[in-house]
Image (cartoon, helix red, strand yellow):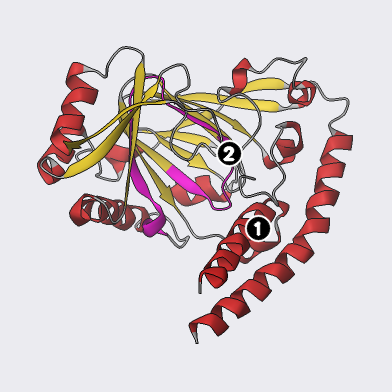
Amino acid sequence: MKRVRALVVGAGLAALIAVLTPIWLAHHLATRITGARRKGTTTEIERIDAAGSSLDAVMAAGRPVIVEGLVDELGLSGIATPDALREIAGDHRINVTEFDAERPYFLYSGGYDTLPLDKRPMAVRELLDTMFDDGVADGSVVYQLFGITSLDGQAATVLDQVDRAVKSQVQMATEPRFSGIWIGSPGAVTPLHHDAWPGLLFQTHGNKRVAMYAPSDRTHLSFRSPLRGEGRWSDLPGRSGDASVSDYPHLARAERFEGTLAPGDVLHIPAFWAHEMEAETANISMPFRFAGTKATYLNPGFLRPASEMLRKQVATLSAR
């Protein structure tokens, strides 16, 4: 029965990819042509005050916005801080990897040339002391992701609080099981990528820089073929601002949105907007995901996740 279900899902994904491929090609060509004479710009991401703002309206607008003070407004200022994580999971042991600071791209880097320096087990309390009190070793960075099932279930407790708070203000369906808690030392980078679902990034401790590009600029960002397993990642340098015009001439046509997240800020990341992050200081943030709409599945940007899911289905069937 499971095999039949997997075959049905696989056939559905294959049919969706067959529909999306010409849509993606048409979108790629159209945006390349219309952007051929455009000169790129850099724009500050809009900042608004949480007091008196409607989170539903922010998300419905479909553009990136930094909502100042929203963590406090939602009553979440006491969670996902160093002290709060020490309290709920301090003795829990995890494996922590240090990476070379010259190549500090985080764990979903999809082929970036990261260089592990050391890996060892430690208690969460020890990690937090290292990150926020003592500092990581010179020449290294640490980036730790706690998914909803980690920390002996304590991460789920935190994300459930976020889920309840968000549901009080947003009508869109939430997906806390795909959310998490991220801890990063200064210089840790999340390279440029795009996701198929909208999200909110809660900044609870420290500062983080963000750069974003609209879906209409995807063709200018040197993304890999969406039919490859790593299609969400760009071939630009991990810090896209370091890309040279001679090596990446199309990037000069893109509109870049930049901003800095401070404690208490929440960044709205619309579906399919490319984004990259870099930690300015040791920091904690929580990416929180929402379900997509029916239109998501016919967006040209969905060709990548559809391809990824089909690859997983084929691998699952091959293993049986």
At 48% from the left edge and 21% from the top edge, which residue is drawn?
A: 103
At 42% from the left edge and 59% from the top edge, which residue is drawn?
A: 175
Which residue is at the front of the view, 294 or 114? 114
- Give the magenta range: 175-200
Residue 307 numbered mark, or none: 1
Task: Place residue 261 in its image quadrant.
Answer: top left
| Numbered disc 2: secondary structure | strand
Q: Residues within 10 Å of mark 1 (few under 14, many from 20)?
A: many
* Residue 141 position (above or below residue 314): above
| Residue at the outermost top position | 138
Q: CA distance from mark 1 to mark 2?
A: 16 Å
Q: Residues within 10 Å of mark 2 (few under 14, many from 20)?
A: many
Q: Which residue is mark 2?
A: 193
* Residue 151: x %, y % from top left: 21, 49
At 77% from the left edge and 25% from the top edge, which residue is drawn?
A: 253
Compared across the picture, whether 152 is left or right of 305 comes to left
* Residue 175 position (above or below residue 3): above
* Residue 98: x %, y % from top left: 33, 27
At 89% from the left edge and 36% from the top edge, which residue is drawn?
A: 33
* Residue 305 position (above or below residue 61): below
Task: Place residue 90 in its image quadrant.
Answer: top left
Would you say the residues marked 1 and 2 are in contact, meaning their CB atoms lie under 8 Å apart? no
Task: Place residue 173 in its image quadrant.
Answer: bottom left
Q: Is residue 219 visible?
A: yes
Q: Amino acid at mark 2?
A: His
Q: Please tell me which of labels 1 and 2 falls first in the chain.
A: 2
Which residue is at the front of the view, 293 or 169? 293
